[in-house]
Image (cartoon, helix red, strand yellow):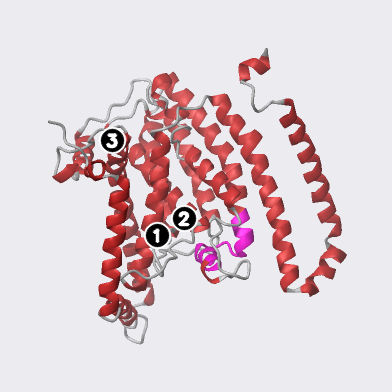
Amino acid sequence: MNKVPFLKKIGLLPFLAGGAFLFGLVFLVWKVLGYPTVQPLIDGMRGGLVGWQSAFGGPGELPLGIYTTIILVLKLLGVMVVLILVGAYSTYVERKILAFMQDRLGPTRVGYKGLLQPIADGLKLIQKECIVPLGADKVFHYWAPILVFIPSMMGAVIIPFGEGLIPFDLSMGVLYLFAIGAIGVMGIFLAAHGSDNKYSSFGGFRAVGQLISYEVPLAFSMMTVVLLAGDIRVGGIIDAQLKGGGLGFPIWFIVPQFLGFLIFFIANVAETNRVPFDLPEAESELVSGFHTEFTGIRFAFFFLAEYVNIFIASSMITTLFLGGYGGFDLPFLGQTLSSVVWFALKVFLLFFAIVWLRGTLPRLRIDQLMELCWKRLVPLAMINFFVTGIIKLANEIRLNPNLLWPILEKGWGTALLFFILFFVGMVVWVRHLLKGVFGKPALERRA
């Protein structure tokens, strides 16, 4: 007899109603008890770390550099452990979600409800033999998985896991992700070129073209948020949404920038090679794309890097558009743990949407993928950036009218040039749109 998943057995609405009732009951108990939280315990732990710092750097004591090095190493180890666990169990969550959508059970054999399946898969891949093709470039074949995996880990150091839990709030902020993204692209190209396989070469060329192309609308959407926030740091962008530092009043940027949110979300799905943009590893055409010839732990590096990149992409969407870790305090948790829960919930919802696309949409053709980027997303992202700049300037003049005359006196020529370029670009784009270029298939246009 087949088992029926619990959620399908009781129905979605009764499940949500029961969850809301349970949350209300917990909130009522929390109010009756006088709103106790674990925040004092967390503040005590932080105070202990600050007090431990006083043992370094004084006369006759250990150098302060030793303390800094220890904290740096602990932060990096903590981020690495979190990413490995998130990457491993993202596969489990994805399989469960797809099984629910397709009326299956998903992993059930290893551990309770299949919870140990990611660990079993990892041990299996570690024990498998790493095979190198005879004609492959061994140096490229060895280093390519590492060059793909390490940037994924490096990108997570600016993720705001909660309030006061940003490992490194770098001054270059979100631009840091673009700086290390080039290393991952190089690793994919080396994997394809060094495999001595035509399927891998096709997958590598597709991947490089796709990743470089979709970075353009991604960058425009990201810079639009930076323009609104007035800060490029991750912490500054979140504060601008929660405290009103950007527009003068607190608001999540998804509200004034819903178009930018859609462009950024689509571009991130393409950057992570997910359906419907998974052409670099299309199994119906290219066996497995650029990592066709990789086995064992080397394949595990590619596999883990993909899911870590999905987590980083979801985290950055949450940071830029959904207020980061912002949210009201939850019962008994306190401010810090509540922020962690809110951040994790938002990231999970975005991850669910990405998995939902995999279970719903077919794969695009390569010409459709490139046309979507260069003929739709890039013009829309540029227009959105330009209009946002005008609105931001108008808002600054509203807050400080004395800025108007210096802008007109010194910047009118540049503003006029940008307006002419924008107008010409709009005319060309609308002309192509009216001709129906976007709606016709590539083969029909060639005919």
Based on the displayed image, in which of its 4 quarters is residue 352 positioned?
Answer: top left
Provide the residue span drawn in magenta: 224-241
Q: Of helix, strand and loop, which one carries label 1?
A: helix
The amino acid marked with disc number 3 is Ala
Based on the displayed image, in which of its 4 quarters is residue 149 positioned?
Answer: top left
Mark 1 to mark 3 CA distance (whole Å): 25 Å
Q: Is residue 393 visible?
A: yes
Q: Which residue is mark 1?
A: 343
Is 101 situated above or below 444?
below
Q: Earlier in the sequence, mark 2 or mark 3?
A: 3
Q: Residue at x 34, y 72 (%)?
A: 66
Q: Earlier in the sequence, mark 1 or mark 3?
A: 3
Q: Of helix, strand and loop, which one carries label 2?
A: helix
380 left or right of 122 in image = right
Tag of residue 177: none
Based on the displayed image, in which of its 4 quarters is residue 283 positioned?
Answer: top left
Tag of residue 318: 2
Image coordinates of residue 320 in percent, x first then y, are 52, 57
Q: Which residue is mark 3?
A: 99
Q: Camera-side residue: 180 or 8?
A: 8
233 left or right of 290 in image = right
Circles 1 and 2: CB atoms closer than 8 Å: yes
Image coordinates of residue 280 in percent, x first then y, are 46, 29
Badge 2: residue crowd in 10 Å (few <14, some 14–19, many ≥20) = many
**The C terminus is located in which quarter?**
top right
Residue 227 drawn in magenta:
yes
Q: Residue at x 31, y 53 (%)?
A: 16
Mark 1 to mark 2 CA distance (whole Å): 7 Å
Q: Residue at x 33, y 51 (%)?
A: 83
